[in-house]
């Protein structure tokens, strides 16, 4: 016997989704076209560059940002050469394009929101529970509205990845700015700095190590999400792993997973090196 009537949360969400689709369909289609052009353009550039040349470029970047650590450069060359040897180069570049594109947009949205939350307590009080909700929600749930609004393909995968990877950027940017010593803030005020000057010349430089840690977390979460996004048609190594799972092809699935691990390690080492540089500076 039911004592309490069920609250129609699911029905309300369904009506909201239908209302958004009916009233903002043209805007969503335009946004989808722009995002598709962005990620596909980046992918085409990566695929256009000869693999050997791109491996050398990435190894040089890894060597440079890691303060000339030869081991990281050699590891990058070996890892990317293995991906090329396995015949997964194009899939890997599709994955990298999706990760970097999603991470860039997540940072462009997340860092300003983190700054706003650090500057305004009301904004921080509103954003904090939203971030809690976003971080505790199972990642598969993000795929449902993404498919409804944007169909199948790279764009819904990109949207779900941005949403999933954004919370650590907002939190750590907020934390970094709040941890700036009060003495530095008072000194900048004593010299007559405006709010913009104080932010750009004092708070952001001091908070850079914490913000860069957020960037690292954002990229790692983006990598994990683009694999899941293969379930809604996103291209890349996630699709290779998904096909291996569906066909019980252990070899193909393992090779796709190995390529994902290699890309994750390279991206992690590069971003960690950037964080270490900021701390030393």
Image (cartoon, rainbow, N blue to C red):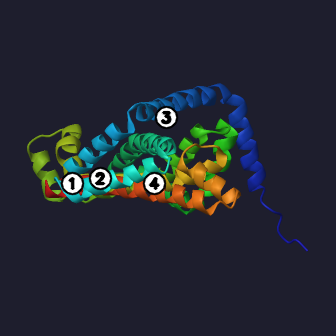
134 or 69, nearer to the observer: 69
Give the Cα distance between marks 2 and 1. 7 Å
Residue 66 numbered tag: 1
How far apart are the two marked residues, 2 and 4, measured between alpha carbons?
21 Å
Q: Are marks 3 and 4 in contact (CB under 8 Å)?
A: no
Mark sitting earlier along the chain (2/4): 4
Residue located 74% across and 38% down the image: 18
Task: Pinpoint residue 194: horizontal percent, then vertical percent.
Answer: 19, 38
Q: Earlier in the sequence, mark 1 or mark 4?
A: 1
Camera-nearest label, 3 or 4: 3
Mark 2 vs 1: CB contact within 8 A = yes
The Cα atoms of the two marked residues, 3 and 4, are separated by 22 Å
- From what the image shows, is residue 100 above or below residue 3? above
Residue 39 badge: 3
Labels 1 & 4 near each other (Cβ < 8 A): no
Q: On the image, numbered disc 4 is attached to which residue?
A: 167
- Find disc 2 in the rendering and name its residue: 270
Q: Name which of mark 1 and mark 3 comes first in the sequence.
A: 3
Residue at 72% in and 48% down: 13
Q: CA distance from mark 2 to mark 3?
A: 21 Å
Q: Nearer the viewer, mark 1 or mark 4?
A: 1
Gap in angstroms between the C-alphas marked 1 and 3 = 27 Å
Neighbour class for label 2 at 10 Å: few (<14), some, many (≥20)? many
């Amino acid at each position: 016997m039911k004592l309490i009537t069920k609250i129609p949360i699911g029905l309300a969400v369904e009506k909201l989704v239908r209302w958004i689709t009916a009233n903002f369909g043209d805007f969503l289609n335009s946004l989808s076209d722009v995002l598709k052009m962005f990620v596909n353009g980046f992918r085409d550039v990566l695929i256009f560059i000869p693999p050997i040349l791109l491996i050398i470029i990435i190894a040089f970047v890894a060597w440079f940002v890691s303060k000339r650590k030869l081991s990281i450069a050699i590891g990058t060359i070996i890892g990317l050469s293995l991906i090329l040897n396995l015949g997964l180069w194009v899939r890997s570049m599709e994955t990298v394009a999706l990760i970097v594109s999603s991470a860039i947009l997540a940072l462009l949205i997340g860092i300003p929101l983190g700054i706003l939350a650090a500057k305004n307590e009301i904004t921080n009080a509103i954003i904090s529970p939203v971030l809690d909700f976003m971080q505790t929600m199972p990642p598969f749930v993000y795929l449902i509205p993404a498919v409804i609004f944007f169909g199948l393909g790279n764009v819904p995968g990109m949207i779900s990845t941005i949403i999933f990877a954004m919370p650590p950027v907002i939190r750590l940017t907020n934390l970094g700015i709040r941890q700036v010593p009060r003495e530095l803030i008072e000194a900048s005020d004593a010299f007559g700095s405006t709010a913009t000057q104080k932010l750009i010349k004092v708070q952001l430089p001091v908070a850079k190590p914490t913000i860069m840690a957020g960037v690292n977390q954002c990229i790692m979460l983006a990598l994990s999400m683009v694999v899941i996004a293969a379930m809604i048609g996103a291209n890349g190594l996630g699709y290779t792993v998904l096909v291996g799972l569906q066909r019980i092809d252990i070899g193909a699935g393992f090779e796709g997973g190995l390529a994902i691990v290699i890309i994750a390690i390279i991206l992690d080492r590069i971003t960690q090196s950037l964080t270490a540089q900021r701390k030393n500076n």
